[in-house]
């Protein structure tokens, strides 16, 4: 069944042979409608889990030289340990040199294993970066110069999380490395994130592409914050098309169900007043990239596969074609430039590295614990654009938050909205129910937070999240409302970026929960149009992309927790 053969795709009554080929924007819009969940009708999935064919969560490139990285477990007792709030003010931190230890720490604090769980003979790994269903479709590749203790020449490497090691896949040619170093400067490196869609589709079917993009957003935020803790800056590269990034990574020849689809290229540079820009590749540079000699082939993840043609269709349509006319960048200038903190003496919060390695997803909430209003407001401030990790995204904020407040002392239960871009407030007021109050809550005058409707929202929150009690049993839950007009204004390539922004918001929520001795969980299963109906949305201009629950967890004591690395 093709993308436009479903009842919501194409033009009813029109023969498929007579239709014009859909545009990329039509493809992503059709995919979004097709993959919505609704009560009694979920997006197409596998219908059951073939556990014997579950994809391997760890990709290896073989044969390939492997260089072990230093394992740096956090010292919870270190008095001088970097504190949580300091990471959001990286301009106050010392800039670490790029060496074997700092590169090891960058990866250890963003993509490494955080623990193993065990239950009745089954054993599975958790990682620092969250993943939908713990399936981890995101793969990490690096490009860097000579690093003492690791390699004596510029290299392209794949990060092997299970071993915490680099697989050296190629030596970068002098021409390629000279160009990259000229643009980025010394002490810089590039990190590329890719997705293996099959890892998610094995469990989630057609909706899996959405979850891959959530995970890419989580991974970007984890990388950006890990870089900030070293005094570095992370920024998504907008000048390179996906096809050029694939060539730079040697992924062009890898095809089929287990192919890696490029998500983004991220420049990691020492912090400076103005971040350096990686220029679009010239024809000479593309030719030099084509002469790179590659080592190793990707390990096989599954023996059998199920075809999900719509995933490949949306992935193709959403590929980034390269630099675009600067039509929609004005929104970035209107975004509130808030970093979330003023300098604190002494630095506040738990030790940073211990927190990121302790982060877990809650399975259920206790339905009774409350949080203070001042803590809730602090969480909301952290979610505003302008600071880390949102500074890594060189585009204006396009996601606002619809918040279901359940148990916040000093703040009434109800439906709230956090408007993350002032330029969108008037449009939201026009789009949402006209009877909403839009009232500023006491104590939040500095926040673009508004009470829409005072009521007990626990039932609606749980129902909207596929009838999952966790969405009503925490202190609050929320839905992330994306401005889909950006797709029509810029192009289909903006569609995955909306999910990345939502995933980055989710990553910050995870960390904020841990810092408050609470816990969070991302919710990818929700009834899209139930949310829209509750908000009174009549058009498709604003769409819910991700849900999140925040509260006190109920621990599953049947599970054993084992160290991440022996």
Image (cartoon, rainbow, N blue to C red):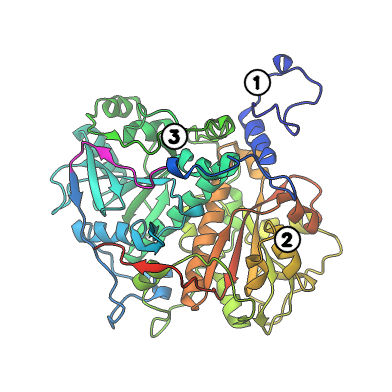
Q: Mark 2 falls on what kind of element?
A: helix
Q: CA distance from mark 2 to mark 1?
A: 38 Å
On the question of residue 564 being in view, the answer is yes
Q: Residues within 10 Å of mark 3 (few under 14, many from 20)?
A: many
Label tally: 3
Tell me the residue that label 3 is attached to. 242
Position of residue 400 relative to residue 62, above or below, is: below
Which of marks 1 and 2 precedes in the sequence? 1
Which of marks 3 and 1 precedes in the sequence? 1
Position of residue 379 relative to residue 64, above or below, is: below
Residue 551 image-quadrant placement: bottom right
Q: Relative to the observer, which residue lies in front, 321 or 149?
A: 149
Position of residue 322 relative to residue 95, above or below, is: above
What is the x, y in percent for residue 3? 65, 29
Q: Relative to the observer, which residue lies in front, 344 or 380?
A: 380
Which of marks 2 and 3 precedes in the sequence? 3
Tell me the residue that label 1 is attached to. 21
Residue, x 51% and y 57% (percent of image)?
504
Q: Which contiguous range is marked in magenta?
A: 55-65
Q: Residues within 10 Å of mark 2 (few under 14, many from 20)?
A: some
Q: Quadrant of the N terminus?
A: top right
Residue 179 image-quadrant placement: top left
What is the x, y in percent for residue 261? 44, 36
């Amino acid at each position: 069944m093709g993308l436009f053969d479903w009842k919501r795709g194409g033009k009813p009554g029109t023969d498929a042979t007579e239709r014009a080929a859909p545009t990329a924007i039509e493809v992503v819009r059709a995919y979004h409608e097709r993959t919505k969940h609704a009560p009694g009708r979920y997006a197409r999935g596998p219908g059951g889990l073939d556990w014997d064919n579950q994809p391997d969560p760890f990709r290896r490139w073989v044969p390939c030289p492997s260089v072990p990285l230093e394992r740096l477990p956090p010292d919870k007792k270190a008095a001088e340990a970097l504190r949580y709030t300091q990471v959001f003010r990286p301009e106050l931190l010392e800039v670490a040199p790029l060496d074997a230890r700092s590169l090891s720490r960058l990866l250890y604090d963003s993509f490494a294993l955080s623990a193993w769980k065990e239950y009745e003979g089954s054993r599975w790994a958790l990682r620092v970066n969250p993943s939908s269903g713990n399936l981890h479709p995101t793969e990490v590749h690096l490009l860097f110069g000579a690093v003492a203790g690791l390699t004596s020449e510029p290299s392209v490497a794949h990060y092997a999380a299970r071993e915490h090691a680099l697989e050296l896949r190629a030596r970068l040619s002098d021409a390629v490395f000279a160009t990259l170093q000229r643009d980025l400067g010394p002490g810089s490196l590039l990190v590329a994130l890719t997705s293996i869609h099959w890892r998610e589709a094995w469990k989630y079917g057609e909706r899996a592409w959405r979850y891959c993009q959530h995970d890419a957003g989580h991974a970007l935020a984890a990388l950006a914050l890990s870089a900030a803790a070293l005094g570095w800056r992370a920024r998504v590269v907008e000048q390179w098309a996906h096809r050029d990034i694939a060539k730079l990574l040697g992924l062009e020849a890898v095809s089929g169900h287990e192919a890696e689809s490029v998500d983004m290229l991220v420049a990691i540079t020492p912090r400076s007043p103005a971040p350096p820009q990686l220029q679009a590749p010239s024809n000479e540079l593309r030719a030099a990239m084509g002469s790179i000699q590659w080592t190793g082939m990707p390990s096989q993840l599954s023996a059998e596969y199920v075809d999900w043609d719509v995933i490949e269709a949306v992935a193709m349509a959403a590929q980034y074609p390269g630099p675009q006319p600067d039509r929609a960048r004005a929104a970035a200038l209107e975004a509130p430039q808030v970093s979330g903190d003023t300098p604190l003496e002494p630095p506040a919060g738990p030790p940073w590295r211990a927190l990121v390695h302790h982060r877990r997803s809650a399975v259920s909430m206790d339905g009774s614990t409350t949080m203070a209003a001042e803590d809730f407001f602090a969480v909301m401030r952290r979610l505003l654009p302008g600071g880390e990790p949102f500074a890594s995204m060189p585009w204006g904020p396009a996601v606002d938050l619809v918040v279901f407040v359940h148990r916040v002392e000093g703040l009434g239960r109800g439906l709230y909205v956090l408007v993350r871009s002032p330029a969108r407030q008037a449009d939201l007021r026009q789009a949402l129910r006209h009877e909403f109050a839009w009232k500023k809550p006491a104590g939040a005058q500095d926040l673009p937070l508004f009470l829409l409707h005072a009521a007990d929202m626990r039932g609606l929150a749980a129902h909207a999240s596929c009838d999952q009690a966790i969405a009503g049993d925490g202190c609050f839950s929320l839905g992330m409302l994306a401005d889909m007009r950006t797709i029509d204004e810029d192009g289909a390539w903006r569609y995955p970026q909306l999910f990345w922004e939502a995933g980055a918001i989710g990553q910050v929520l995870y960390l904020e929960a841990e810092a408050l001795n609470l816990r969070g969980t991302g919710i990818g299963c929700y009834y899209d149009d139930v949310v829209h109906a509750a908000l009174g949305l009549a058009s498709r201009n604003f769409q819910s992309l991700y849900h999140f629950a925040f509260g006190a967890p109920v621990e599953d004591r049947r599970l054993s927790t084992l160290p991440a690395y022996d």
